[in-house]
C-alpha cells in the first residue's frame, strides 16, 4: 500500500487495534444491551489476559505489513465485533477505502456489516446508505439507485438518500425523477436552490419539444419561470418554439430577452439572432446591441465584439467603433491592432480564427473549460455556472 499516506495508515491501524481490543476486552459492554458481543474472545472462550492477542490478529497485522491488503482485511473483518463500540471503526474504514477509490474493499466492509443478524436497525440503515455510496462511486448506478430508494424509506436518513438519488437521476438524465426527488427534498426543507428545479423543468420541456408536444413544453416552461426570476433558459426555449411556429417577431424578442439575462450565450446565439432578423434588419439590430453593451460596460462590449468577430461579422458597419474601442483598450490586442493599421478587418478575421479554436467558456465553480456553453457543468454537475472565457494567445 505504498500510495497511502503513512499517517492515514497509522490512523486506520489505531482504529483497528482499538476496535479489536475493545471487542476483546469487552470495553463498553454495558452499552451493548444484549446485542450479543461477538468478540473473538467470547466466541473462542479464550483467555482475556491483557498480554495475549489472538493469533489471527497478529496474522492480520503481518498481512498488512507484507502488503497483502485483502488478506489483512479478511482477518480484521473476522475479528471486528459489530457491537456499538466498534461499529464506527467499520464505517470509518469503509469511508476511507471509498474515498481512496478502493470501492471493492469498502463494499466488503459494508456487506460484512449487513450480513450480521445482530446489527441494530439504525446501523443497518447506515450500512445500506454507505453501501449505496460505494456502488455510486463504482459507477453501478442501478444498484445505488435501488439501495438509496430503500434507505429513503427510513425517516432518519431520508434527506441524505433523496439528495443522493437526485444526483443519480441527474447523471442518468432521468429529469422527471430528479424533479420528483427535488420536490420531496423541498418538502423536507433540504432542497438546493429553486434554479435547479427550473432547469429540470427546462430539460423535460426540451424533450417534449423534441417529440413535437409544444403545448406540454410551454406549460413546463411557464412552471420553470415561476421557480426563479430572470431565467434565460426558459426564454431561449420559448424563442425556439416561436420560431418553429413561424412567429419571427416573438422569437427575436424572446431570444433578446435570453441574451440580456445571460450575455454568455452571445457567442452561440448571435449568428442565430441575426439570421432571424434577416439582412434588412441586421445592421439596425447590431447598432442596438452595441449601444446596449456600451451602456453595460467594457466586458459586455468585449463579449459582443468577440462574438461578432467569431461569427465573421467584423466588417459590419455598426461594429467599426466598437472594434476599435475593444482592441485599443487591451494592451496585447492593441499591439496587434496598431501593427495591422489600415487593415483592421484582416486583423479581426485572424483574431476570429483564433477565437474559434479557443475554449470559450469556463465553469465558475470548478474551472472546467469548454468550447460550447453548458447549462449543467459536465465536470462538477453545477447548474448555470458557465462564464465567457475567451483566452486568445497572441504571443
Ligand atoms: Zn463545473
Image (spheres, grey):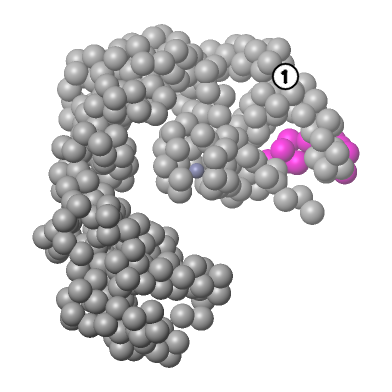
Viewer can see residue 276? no
Residue at image mark 1? 297
Dot 1 surroundings within 10 Å: few (below 14), some, or many (20 or more)? few
Q: Regarding mark 1 in the picture, which secondary structure is present there? A: loop
Q: Which residues are magenta?
A: 338-349
303 sits left or right of 241 in the view: right
User: Residue shown at 51%/34% (left/top)?
Assistant: 385
341, 263: nearer the viewer? 263
Instruction: Answer above or below: position of 23 versus 222.
Output: below
x%, y% of residue 181?
Answer: 24, 32
Judged from this view, the residue extending furthest toward the left is 117
Instruction: Answer above or below: position of 223 versus 351.
Output: above
**Corner quadrant of residue 74:** bottom left
**Corner quadrant of residue 92:** bottom left
User: Residue shown at 16%/61% (left/top)?
Assistant: 36
Instruction: Answer above or below: position of 10 versus 350.
Output: below
x%, y% of residue 371?
Answer: 52, 45
User: Residue shown at 63%/44% (left/top)?
Assistant: 355
Image label count: 1
177 sits left or right of 384 in the view: left
Instruction: Name the quadrant of the C terminus.
Output: bottom right
**Corner quadrant of residue 246:** top left
Viewer can see residue 269? yes
x%, y% of residue 302?
Answer: 70, 29
332, 153: nearer the viewer? 153
9 sits left or right of 197 in the view: right
Q: Main secondary structure of the magenta part?
A: helix
Residue 286 in the magenta stretch? The answer is no
Instruction: Answer above or below: position of 178 versus 319.
Output: below
User: Residue shown at 79%/33% (left/top)?
Assistant: 327
Amino acid at each position: 500500500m505504498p500510495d497511502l499516506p503513512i499517517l492515514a495508515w497509522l490512523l486506520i491501524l489505531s482504529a483497528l487495534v482499538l476496535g479489536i481490543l475493545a471487542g476483546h476486552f469487552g470495553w463498553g459492554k454495558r452499552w451493548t444491551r444484549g446485542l450479543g458481543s461477538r468478540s473473538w474472545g467470547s466466541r473462542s472462550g479464550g483467555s482475556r489476559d491483557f498480554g495475549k492477542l489472538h493469533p489471527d490478529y497478529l496474522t492480520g497485522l503481518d498481512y498488512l505489513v507484507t502488503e497483502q491488503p485483502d488478506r489483512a482485511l479478511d482477518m480484521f473483518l473476522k475479528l471486528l465485533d459489530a457491537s456499538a463500540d466498534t461499529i464506527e471503526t467499520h464505517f470509518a474504514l469503509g469511508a476511507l477505502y471509498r474515498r481512496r477509490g478502493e470501492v471493492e474493499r469498502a463494499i466488503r466492509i459494508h456487506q460484512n456489516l449487513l450480513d450480521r443478524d445482530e446489527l441494530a436497525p439504525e446501523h443497518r440503515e447506515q450500512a445500506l446508505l454507505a453501501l449505496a455510496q460505494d456502488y455510486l462511486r463504482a459507477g453501478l448506478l442501478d444498484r445505488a439507485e435501488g439501495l438509496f430508494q430503500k434507505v429513503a424509506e427510513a425517516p432518519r436518513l431520508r434527506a441524505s438518500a433523496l439528495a443522493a438519488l437526485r444526483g443519480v437521476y441527474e447523471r442518468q438524465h432521468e429529469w422527471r425523477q430528479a424533479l420528483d426527488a427535488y420536490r420531496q427534498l423541498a418538502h423536507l426543507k433540504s432542497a438546493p436552490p429553486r434554479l435547479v428545479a427550473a432547469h429540470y423543468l427546462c430539460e423535460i420541456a426540451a424533450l417534449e419539444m423534441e417529440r413535437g408536444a409544444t403545448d406540454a413544453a410551454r406549460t413546463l416552461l411557464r412552471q420553470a419561470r415561476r421557480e426563479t426570476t430572470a431565467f434565460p433558459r426558459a426564454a431561449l426555449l420559448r424563442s425556439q418554439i416561436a420560431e418553429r411556429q413561424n412567429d419571427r417577431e416573438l422569437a427575436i424578442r424572446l431570444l433578446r430577452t435570453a441574451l440580456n439575462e445571460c450575455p454568455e450565450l452571445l457567442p452561440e446565439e448571435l449568428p442565430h439572432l441575426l439570421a432571424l432578423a434577416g439582412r434588412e434588419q441586421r445592421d439596425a439590430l447590431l447598432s442596438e446591441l452595441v449601444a446596449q453593451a456600451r451602456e453595460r460596460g467594457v466586458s459586455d462590449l468585449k463579449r459582443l465584439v468577440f462574438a461578432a468577430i467569431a461569427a465573421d461579422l467584423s466588417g459590419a458597419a455598426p461594429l467599426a467603433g466598437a472594434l476599435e474601442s475593444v482592441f485599443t483598450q487591451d494592451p496585447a490586442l492593441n499591439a496587434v491592432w496598431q501593427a495591422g493599421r489600415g487593415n483592421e478587418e484582416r486583423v479581426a478575421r485572424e483574431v476570429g480564427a483564433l477565437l474559434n479554436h479557443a475554449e470559450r467558456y469556463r465553469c465558475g465553480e470548478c474551472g472546467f473549460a469548454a468550447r460550447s456553453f453548458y447549462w449543467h457543468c459536465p465536470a462538477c454537475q453545477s447548474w448555470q455556472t458557465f462564464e465567457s472565457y475567451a483566452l486568445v494567445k497572441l504571443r
